[in-house]
Amino acid sequence: MKLIADTHTHTIASTHAYSTLQENVSAAAKMGLYALAVTDHGALMPGAPGRWYFENLRVVPRKLDGVLVLRGEEADLVDAEGHTDLIPTDLETLDWVVASIHRQVFRRYVPVGNGFRPVELPGPATKEEVTQAWLNIAKNPRVNVIGHSGTAEYPYDYETVIPEFGRNAKLVELNESTFSGRKSSVPNCRAIMELCKKCGVPIIVNSDAHFSTRIGCFPNSLRLLEEIGFPEELVVNSSAERFEAYLREYTGVFRGE
Ligand SMILES: [Zn+2]
Ligand SMILES: [Zn+2]
């Protein structure tokens, strides 16, 4: 299987990633990718991009070095009610949203007015809370990708939630960085992929690159998919036609072309 898009990548705008958008695009072009989504972290992540960063992504050319560039964000889940740190005015610009749980944000804020207020972390998250959070995210029409949900720290009821992701056209991510940075999560990722296969839920493989040399590199993910005999037709970024069909149906990328 060859993958043609990397839709979860970070730039220096995240302030804990080390390549520019141009460097990432050049790397994507070198890897022969059809599309790259730039998905820096949302507003509540420590060191997040400045207030106008996402809204102004419209200045980035749609095609650069022959690569389709998607204007994205990796948004944070805030609580079990499904709140995220996505900002409505940013959503007018954004093509692509990855929703993820990070311990720096999840349950550390409560919604107040148009924003959030930090609170003391109320003990470890329960499986019920995480399950509820993902069920609510499944219903968010602006979320495209369920980011690294196999994180060992935040287990949820896979049997209940994975079919809901499928019913709501959410792409369940297999995240290459898990194999180097979050090894304890690998068994969960395998279980999630096996369930996606069983339930016919589409997935997407992403690098979650925080440096340009990682763009478009997915060796461990591809090995895992091969080991479990994962069907290629459920991997949305396994062909340009398949990925473009998803973009046409669920995003505004080609609107007004
Ligand atoms: Zn990051
Ligand atoms: Zn993440």
Image (cartoon, grey):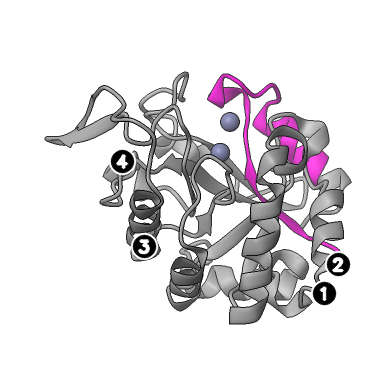
Q: Residue at x 37, y 29 (%)?
A: 44
Q: Which amino acid type corresponds to the residue marked 4 in the rendered image?
A: Ile
Mark 2 touches mark 4? (CB < 8 Å): no
Q: Residue at x 58, y 80 (%)?
A: 199
- Which quadrant of the structure image shows residue 2? bottom right
Ligand 2 within 8 angstroms of badge 3 C-beta: no
Residue 42's spot in the image, x, y percent?
A: 43, 35
Q: Is residue 128 above or below residue 236?
A: above
Find the distance from the CA under tag 3 to the CA under tag 4.
20 Å
Quarter of the render that holds ligand 2 = top right
Which of the two discs, 3 and 1, labels the residue nearer the N terminus? 3
Kind of residue at disc 2: Glu
Instruction: From the image, tell me which residue sits under label 2.
Output: 226
In front of the other: 213 or 82: 82
Q: CA distance from mark 4 to mark 1?
A: 39 Å
Q: Is residue 63 above or below residue 194?
A: above
Residue 244 shows in the view? no
Marked residue nearer the N-terminal end (4 or 1): 4
Instruction: Classify mark 1: residues with Cα within 10 Å, few (<14), some (14-19) or many (20+).
Output: few
Q: Are marks 1 and 2 in contact (CB under 8 Å)?
A: yes
**Dot 2: element:** helix
Seen at 38% across and 36% down, the residue is: 106
- SS label for mark 4: loop
Image x and y of residue 216, in percent: 79, 47
Q: Label 4: which residue?
A: 87
Position of 234 with respect to 126 (left or right) is right
Question: Up-down: is 183 above or below 53?
Answer: below
Residue on which the image places disc 3: 135
**Which percent across, then down, holds residue 60?**
56, 40
Q: Magenta stretch: give its range.
A: 1-28
Q: Residues within 10 Å of mark 2 (few under 14, many from 20)?
A: few
Q: Which residue is mark 1?
A: 229
